[in-house]
Each structure stands twice: as structure tokens, then as C-alpha cells.
Amino acid sequence: MTDRNDDLFDTARRVIPGGVNSPVRAYGSVGGTPRFLASASGARVTDAAGQEYIDLVASWGPALLGHAQPDVVAAVQDAATRGLSFGAPTEGEVELAELIADRVRHGDARPVERVRLVSTGTEATMTAIRLARGATGRDLLVKFAGHYHGHSDGLLAAAGSGVATLALPGSAGVPAPIAAQTLVIDYNDPDALAAVFAEHGDRIAAVIVEAASANMGVVAPLPGFNRLIAETAHAHGALMILDEVLTGFRVHPAGFWGLQQEAGEEYQPDIITFGKVVGGGMPLAALGGRAEVMDLLAPTGPVYQAGTLSGNPLSVAAGLATLRLATPEVYDAVDAAADRLATALDAALTDAGVVHAVPRAGNLFGVVFAPDAPRTYAEAQAQESFRYAPFFHAMREQGIALPPSVFEAWFLTVAHGEEELAAIEAALPAAAAAAACAQP
Ligand code: PLP
């Protein structure tokens, strides 16, 4: 039986490559027709056929407060009445930059002295890399296999997210000389880090790392690994770019960096990138860092970066409203919900006899069909990922929308209350049973 989603997908494929504007939305790894969403409110989304789902995608992270949070929507509406885009500085963007800088702190440590607003996480990481190259006068970049930092040329080598889901080694269309500037090493591997710096140390501009990796499934850094990256990079005159596009303002008011500082793992990244929650669901991202590095950006410095829509007033309004509403109580509630669901997921898969792990990084979690939580991309890929499609569809049939790939985190919002959490818990046993019966 077809419904409005199938009709739309047929039409979409005639006019949009693959019918989608971002690859993982196409359901390539789970099969079936993507849901075309018509509306979203709180913890729920409604598709084009009128079917409602409890949502564990949260727009891939931004919706920390839940969808269409009334105060955030009102702030955007209010901003819209004053103009959609100016291409000029605004008071709001100054407030947002100050708020970001103020929130990312621990004791005396304040790694964000200056902030530049951009429109997407891809722009933030791309600019951070250019800045690191400009600051050091070096070309090489170290990234970790399975980490995703957006779709700019140099960052698609062995990337996570859709690149992992589609099992691509990288992307066509990236010139070999550009790909050669990126050195890819295993995550959570101190020896690989030491080796790459031993061989190329005086040519490396920066190491870019997801603060906690969540684009090859959730793979937390081993204790001390992020600090080791900072120390190793700095010992060789290179910078550490901490990518908090996904984790920033989601796992803690000061991001995963903040969580780690509280846990006693102190280190100083040179540039931090933000996205997703910082824009409250609107196109907005940012990079921040030490003044002497950030001031190398034009117009004060020689590293060029610009954007017609940078600091867009509607996006800034959404970001400001979201960050102001993201109180410690919000993080406590999301953390508690994550604990509860991770426990229920683990129990359901155990009861069904499915080999699994439930990896965690703060309030991020997901499922892995392997006995142990992976530490590297190779370990993440080695799981029985064929079990995810039946699991995903069994959840969907019970009204729960999971990310359509095993390589993505499950995202909770503060709007997931007792009713939603109980419904997700109730759906898990049937999904676990479906995973148990799955054939490769
Ligand atoms: N960095 C990380 C860690 C991400 O998870 C993402 C997107 O998922 C990006 C960068 C790219 O952000 P965007 O999709 O806004 O370009």
C-alpha cells in the first residue's frame, strides 16, 4: 500500500538527486520510503500521510528543547517582522557571540575569546582549518577515521555519518592533491597519533577531532585521548581543532569539553567549532578560539572568510532563545532520559539474545550490534549492522522514529516526557526481537 510519502518520494526522485537534500535521509541503509515530514512539535514529528512519530532524530541534534519550542518560535517570528536578512552587523549577533564565549568555560579556562558566526557546521570546520593553516603556515591536517566534519573537500577522507552509512572511502570530485593534505589515522590510538607527528610533525597545521565521536555511532574518546591530542599538537607547534558541532550545547552547557573539564581531563583546544543546538534549528554555526588565532580572520587578519547570510537575524534569534532556555535543569532532564532509554535498550536486546553494546558519550547514546562498544572506525564497521534495518522498521511501525542508520546517535530532547519515554520503552522488545531474527 502506498501513501503520500511514496508519492512524494517518486516525484522527489525526478527533481532532486536521490529524492533528498542530504544523503542519509534517503533510507539507503535501512530500505523503504523516507518519511516526508510536514510538522513537528515537542518530541513528535508528523509525516505527509498524517502519521505521528515520537522522534529520536531531533533534526540530527539541534532540537535540544524539542521541536517548535514556543519561545524559540516566537523569537524567530519577532525577528522576522524586523527583516529577514541585512548583510550588516546586528546587536543580536554580538549577544550570541558573548553568550557562546561565556558559556564555554571551566574555572579560569575560557578557550573561546572570539567567535565568528557562519551558517553550517561544514563552513565552521572548513574555516577552522584554513585558520589553522594561516596561523601555522603549514598545510597538513590530521583527522580520525570515522569522524565527520562536514562535506568540504579535505574532510571527506574516511569520514563518518552518510559517508560511513553509504560505505564510501571518500568522495569523487576531490582532487588528489587536496586529499593528500589530510592524514587519516585511527581514533583512540595514541601510537598512531605519535607516529603521524613523528613523521610529519613540522608540516602539520592541525588535528581536527570530534569532541566525542558520534558519526560512526557513538564512540567516546578514551580517557586522556583528547588531552593527548592537545599536548601532542602543541608540542609540535600545531593546533587542536575541537569539533563540537554535534556535542556543543547538547551534552553540557560547555559542550563535551566542559564535561571533560569537570571530569578532571583538562586541555586547551585552539579552535572550537559549533553548530546544531547553537542555531536552535535554524541555519547557524560558529567557530571560536583564542583571540590571537581568531584575529587572523579577515578583516583583522589575512585569512579570508565571509558569508551573505552569516549571522542571519532569524538564526541568531533562534540560537539566542535556545541557549538562554538551555538551563542546567534541561541538561539534567535529557541526561536522565538518556540513562533511562539506554538501560531499556540494553535490557531489551539482552532479553532477545542479541549481541550488542549501548555506547555512551554524555547524553548521547546509540546501539551497536557487537559485544563491545567500539573504540575505532574499524571496530564500528565490524558489527552486525544488518540487524539495524529490521530493528529500525519495527520501531517505526510502533510509532518511534529512529535515525535511519546504525552509524548515528539517538537524540533526545527535553520534551521527551514520561509518556514518550514509556512508549519508546514499550516498543523496544519487539524491535529487539526483529533484530534477533535478522539475516545478513
Ligand atoms: N561536524 C560534526 C561533528 C557533525 O556532526 C556535522 C554534521 O552532522 C558537521 C560537522 C557538519 O555540519 P553541517 O551538517 O551543519 O554542515
Image (cartoon, rainbow, N blue to C red):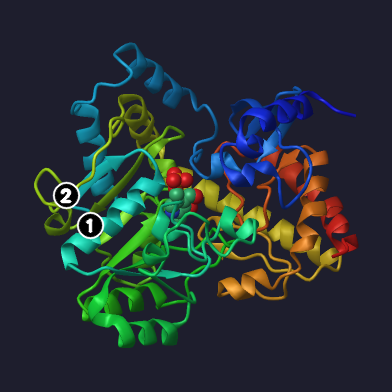
Q: Is mark 1 on a helix, strand or loop?
A: helix
Q: Is residue 418 above or below residue 4?
A: below
Q: What residue type is labelled 1?
A: Leu
Badge 1 is on which residue? 131
Tag count:
2
* Cα gap from disc 1 to disc 2, whole angstroms: 7 Å
Q: Could you tell whether 392 is left or right of 353 in the image? A: left
Q: In this view, does 180 lie above or below 194?
A: above
111 or 135, which is in the foreground?
135
Image x and y of residue 178, in percent: 37, 63
Q: Residue at x 22, y 57 (%)?
A: 131
Badge 2 is on which residue? 297
20 or 371, which is in the foreground?
20
Q: Could you tell whether 360 is left or right of 84 in the image? A: right
Q: What residue type is labelled 2?
A: Leu
**Residue 25's quadrant in the figure?**
top right
Q: Which residue lies furthest to the left in this view?
A: 300
Q: Residue at x 35, y 53 (%)?
A: 125
Residues at circles 1 and 2 in contact by the CB criterion of under 8 Å: yes
Image x and y of residue 34, in percent: 71, 37
**Image quadrant for the N terminus?**
top right
Q: In this view, does 336 lie above or below 70?
A: below
Image x and y of residue 86, in percent: 24, 21
